[in-house]
Image (cartoon, helix red, strand yellow):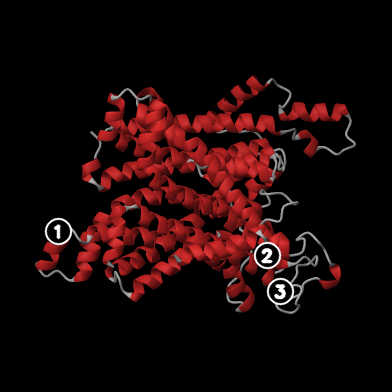
Amino acid sequence: MTYLLTRVGQTLLTLWLILTLTFVGINLAGDPISLLVSDSATSQERLALEQSLGLDAAPLERYGRYLIGVLEGNLGKSFVFDRPALPLLLERLPITLLLVAVSLTLSLLIGVPLGVIAAARHGARLERAILTGSAVAVSAPTFFIGIVLIFVFAVQWRVLPSQGASDWTHFILPALTLSIPRVALFTRYIRAGLLEVLPEDFIRTARAKGLPSGAILYGHALRNALLPFITILGLQLGSLLSGTVISETLFALPGINRLALEGLTRLDYPLILAYTLISSGTVLGLNLLTDALYGLVDPRVRYA
Amino acid sequence: MKAWWGLAAIALLAVFAPLFTPDPRAQDLGSALLPPLSSLTHLLGTDALGRDVLSLTLHGLRVSLLVGIASSLIGAGIGIPLGLLAGYSGGWLERLVMRAVDVGLSLPGMLVALVVLALWGTGLDKLIVVLGLTSWAGFARLARAGALSQRSLEHVLAAQALGAGMRLIIVRHVLPGIMGALIVKFTLEIPANMLSEAALSFLGLGTGVDTPSLGSSIALGYGRLYSGQWWLSLLPGAALTLLVLSINACGEALRVQLDPRQRHAARDE
């Protein structure tokens, strides 16, 4: 319990650190006013805009206002879209989360069995084929995987749509794009974990008492190999979230990252801050969850 | 061994590309959008501005190599000393460094780089620095774990007993014992940073317009995928995949070589 509380405290501290760094970075970065007004604007017009956006206050005062805003869930209006930044991003979140959830499910459903098969056929040609495939998939850039999929399924065969999000078929290629590298990773980790467990005595015992090999692999061995895998999974969620940036751009999915990218290139401070808060908050929260899950799965790590 | 030959071939082609390929920025609108193998002077075809795809690809590989190696050097240069110091000396320094490592590891590096580059502006130098700064934590964690395991070994204790200073002990007695793991980590960090560079350039927040990066070439070529000019995006993408694959394979080979436990396992197979 103490451990978890410390971790929660750490997470909040990290979040505060990130928000402060982003604020400092934004204030060092440049002047959004010049991006928002036309070149012919008078200095009065510039000043008026500065005041209406609250940019005329001293940096420390703005920092204080900003932190209070974070606690109240109010991060100011997006300069570009003239709407409160946080709800603007949050209403795009479901599409991104759906993409992450489908990709992760796909990766697990394909990756874990492939890893078990590779370990069960240790030394066979099938194992080498699986490992070669996964080495290639891990090495290819995510956006390149997406482009190859688009080329095959949307340009050559014309069986799947590649742009937009009007129905569920639009999610197939983006989710596959994000899944393929992770299928490869999961396969490798599960295989390596199993190969470490399989020579142990309790596996020999299970075999000796006549259990079918499927039950040994999935029931006894996999359970023990899953433990280090949970950490990997937690870290992968973070990289999956980064991957959605690519996937949303490539497939024109109206998720949170596409909007954020637009805000980023136009120095839309409230939008950038809200995006930082949402994305880093999600990643940190997921890491925390992973640690808590660790204790649930393995009684040995239950925290004193 | 095959991986090393593959890597050497790709790296040599990339490094010496300026000697045998035309300027990748040279435009020739008269011979735009030539498909691969249709002309002897443009073996891999040309893009919409008539630029040579082979040259763009090889020069892009140079940028990938440069960014991958330089940013990993920065990450290792910050992370390894901090990790060694933390692991060897312990105490408040260790706690401080490890908290920072936790923060560093829990941040999604790509998203951080995205925000920083958007605010700071793009460019090869900035990209290298940002990628280096997002990769120090992994090195620090590995070095600290290594230093911890070496600290109580007899040869280190003997050096302490003889009155050797901390710097000497860390450099001469602790570091050699964990060098293998660090080299493997370094080798695998290079392709990871290459992929980040390509992704950022693909999103338009990478090397900037003046430097022909594979990511930006692929982004440009992607726009012409639907009209049938597949070579503009698929060829540079395949080249980058090949480079990353060969470095990854070398890293794995190194890991097996340098880890005695795995060396036995490899022999058993």
Q: Taking the image as drawn, is residue A92 in sight?
A: no
The answer to the question of whether label 2 and label 3 lie on touching residues, with beta carbons closer than 8 A, is no
| Residue at image mark 1 | A202
**Residue shown at the point (39%, 32%) measured from the top left:** B170
| Residue B20 placement (x, y as % from top left) | 72, 65
Badge 2 and badge 3 in a common chain: yes
| Residue A123 placement (x, y as % from top left) | 30, 71
Q: Amino acid at mark 1?
A: Phe
SS at circle 3: loop
Give the chain of mark 3: B
Give the chain of mark 2: B
Q: Taking the image as drawn, is residue B54 in sight?
A: yes
Label 3 Cα crowd, 10 Å radius (few <14 / some 14-19 / many 20+): some
SS at circle 2: helix
Label 2 Cα crowd, 10 Å radius (few <14 / some 14-19 / many 20+): many
Q: Amino acid at mark 3?
A: Leu
Q: Nearer the viewer, residue A89 or A266?
A: A266
Instruction: State whether residue A138 is above or below residue A36.
Output: below
| Residue A287 placement (x, y as % from top left) | 41, 42
SS at circle 1: helix
The answer to the question of whether label 1 and label 3 lie on touching residues, with beta carbons closer than 8 A, is no
Q: Nearer the viewer, residue B57 or B104?
A: B57
Query: Distance of mark 2 from mark 3, alpha carbons?
Result: 20 Å
Q: Is residue B132 left or right of residue B44?
A: left
| Residue at image mark 3 | B43
Q: Nearer the viewer, residue B131 or B77?
A: B77
Q: Which mark is residue A143?
A: none
**Residue shown at the point (78%, 39%) measured from the top left:** A35
